[in-house]
Image (cartoon, helix red, strand yellow):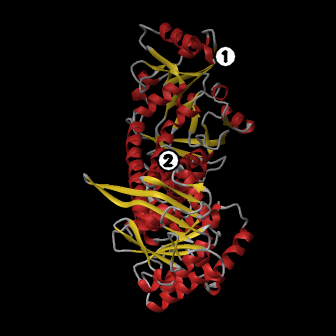
Amino acid sequence: MKFRSLIFANLFRKKIRLILTIGSFAISLVLFTFLAVVNSAFNRGIDIAGADRLVIVSRVGLMQVMPVSYGDQVRAIPGVKYVTHDHWFGGVYQDEKNFFPQFVIDAENHRKVYPEFIVPDDQWNTFVKDQQGAIAGAKTAKRFGWKVGDRIPIKNTLYGPTKTWEFNLDGIYHTEKPDGDEGQFWLQWKNFDENIPDSIKDRMKSTAGWYILKLDSPDDSVRVAKAIDTKFANSSYETKTETESAFAAGFAKQFGNIEFLILSVGSVVFFTLLLVTGNTMAISVRERTAELAVLKAIGVTDSSVLFLVLAESTMIALFGGVLGLLLAWAAIPVISAAVTGLLPPLLLSKTMLSFGLVFAVLVGIVSGLIPGIGAMRMRVVNALRRV
Amino acid sequence: MIRVDGQGNGKSLIQVRGLSKTYRRGGEEIQVLQRLNLDVDKGDFVGFMGPSGSGKTTLLNLLGGLDVPTHGSITVDGDEITHMSGSKLTKWRARHVGFVFQMYNLIPVLTAYQNVELPLLLTKLSGSERRKHVETALSVVGLADRMSHYPRQLSGGQEQRVTIARAIVSDPTFLLCDEPTGDLDRKSADEIMALIEELVGKHGKTVLMVTHDPVVAARAHTTLHLEKGVLVEASKLEQGVVAGGVR
């Protein structure tokens, strides 16, 4: 690119203006990236949901339980391969702020339905045999400094009077994907069921919060879901069966229409960036009318003039974009740690970084278009006359 | 030989025939140039004088392919430029015209070297070839030791020398100088004129120059006066009118 020196020289012509523009761009992009990361965190369940998994919840609502005996009946439906069930435990470790998701799992079948959670066989076998056993995600274990063999007290206020349950940490799970959910904590259903406080025993004994089933084929999902809901229709515990991704989407929507909020704020950020960069370029081009006219006079083509302006605006956006993404990359783990328990883990993936860069380049090109086209169409004679 | 009667032999470097330019301002038509004829041979040095608004700069713009005439034709070295498309005209300018402006119009963020190199970036010359050309051009204008200086670090006269180096670096067919000394003191103006004379005399360049200054105009081989859009007289009449031409 022969005009490289000219593009860079023009870029650094007004250093304070450049720094302010890049700064505005970077801060806006940090905000945009943060919103995208929050959105992604809420939708992660949808993204990682197995296509061959269905979730059964009570038709009344997620907080209503179903009999554990439903498991065998569901397993008998053609097309169903494995069935497992979960409960929400909802305790805290030592302090209210140390919240993380805890699930009461069916140790017998959980692993068959969720092969993406990897637990070493010896640890898993210990857990299955140990009724007070627990498995923690690697991230949660790291967060609290737990290691296998530790005794973990979890205070529960959800079921009856406050009670501290103690568990043996028998294993630590990892996920196949680096952005998988390694923040959960699992305890045995048998332990939970046998130790339910008396005050809620009649309501909670021998129940499951929800069922998850793995199908022989994803093609069977509609038929199986319909068969299950039909089977339990008009019973005391009617069901609502849907794919895991639809369930995750519904769960995310409980927090409000995050996607709409993010799209709205993101749009405002996008147009603000366009205005900031576009304004900078418009002023910059206006200041250089005579220079651009001279370039055209000596033989620089209209399209090259457009290219020069677009290259400059894109460079500004790229600098701002890279700085913004670096700031986001540094800040998001800190924010994620600060909001643990309030929000799902916030992860800035490579895809998001790439998207951020593409977004920055796009803003750069679009913001340079109007001043660039103006410069391209500028008549040399008129421009020189204004000098 | 320079002629203004349209009776040239057809071998002139620049041939202008029946050139008119009309501007529309508001509802009014302003005829700036009226059926001009001009023949300029290679190596000629022509000065155009005239009061403000007489059409000097308009004529220069037309000759340089920066503007298009309302009527008439301009032929340079066999190429008729009046009907060229915008993009073709741009390429033609890059190859054939060197511009020298009153206000220098250098790019302030580029060094003298980089400013002079600009026209060569439009060619297929390699980096080392460009360097050779730029160094030669800056040597010709006497600024070989100022290559890495920015315009703000140069005097007005030096800036104009850089502009001239930029104009000649690609060895164009002719140079168009619009008030090249208009922003300079007398001493600097003399130096610039000496340089332009050297380009004509020593390097065989063809130069067309617009000026308000009779002293500067007197340095040209021939001075033509524009009065209300018409070329009306030659300044060096004492050298004699030859068959409608001026020398």
In the rendered structure, the residue with mark 1 lies on which chain?
A
Is B83 on the left-hand or right-hand side of A116? left
The residue singled out by tag 2 in the image is: A93
Q: Quadrant of the C terminus of chain A?
A: bottom left
| First of labels 2, 1 by sequence position | 2
In the rendered structure, the residue with mark 2 lies on which chain?
A
> Picture quarter containing residue B42?
bottom right
**How dense is the environment of label 2, judged by Cα within 10 Å: few (below 14), some, or many (20 and up)?**
some
Q: Report if residue B131 is visible in the image.
A: yes
Pick whichever, A27 or A233, lies toward us. A27
In this view, the mark in front (2 or 1): 1
Residue at image location 43% in from the left, 59% down from the top: A281
> Picture quarter containing residue A381?
bottom left
Residue at image location 46% in from the left, 15% down from the top: A239
Give the vertical position of A377 relative to A177 (above or below).
below
Q: Secondary structure at mark 1?
A: loop
Residue A25, horizontal then vertical, whole percent: 45, 58
Q: Which mark is residue B117?
A: none
Q: Report if residue A316 is visible in the image.
A: no
Pick whichever, A243 or B86, lies toward us. B86
Identity of the amino acid at label 2?
A: Tyr
Residue A154, horizontal then vertical, whole percent: 50, 43
Residue at image location 47% in from the left, 30% down from the top: A249
How far is mark 2 from mark 1, CA to CA? 39 Å
Pick whichever, B183 or A77, lies toward us. B183
Identity of the amino acid at label 1?
A: Asp
Residue A291, horizontal then vertical, whole percent: 48, 67
The residue singled out by tag 1 in the image is: A216
Residue at image location 42% in from the left, 28% down from the top: A198
Q: Secondary structure at mark 2?
A: loop
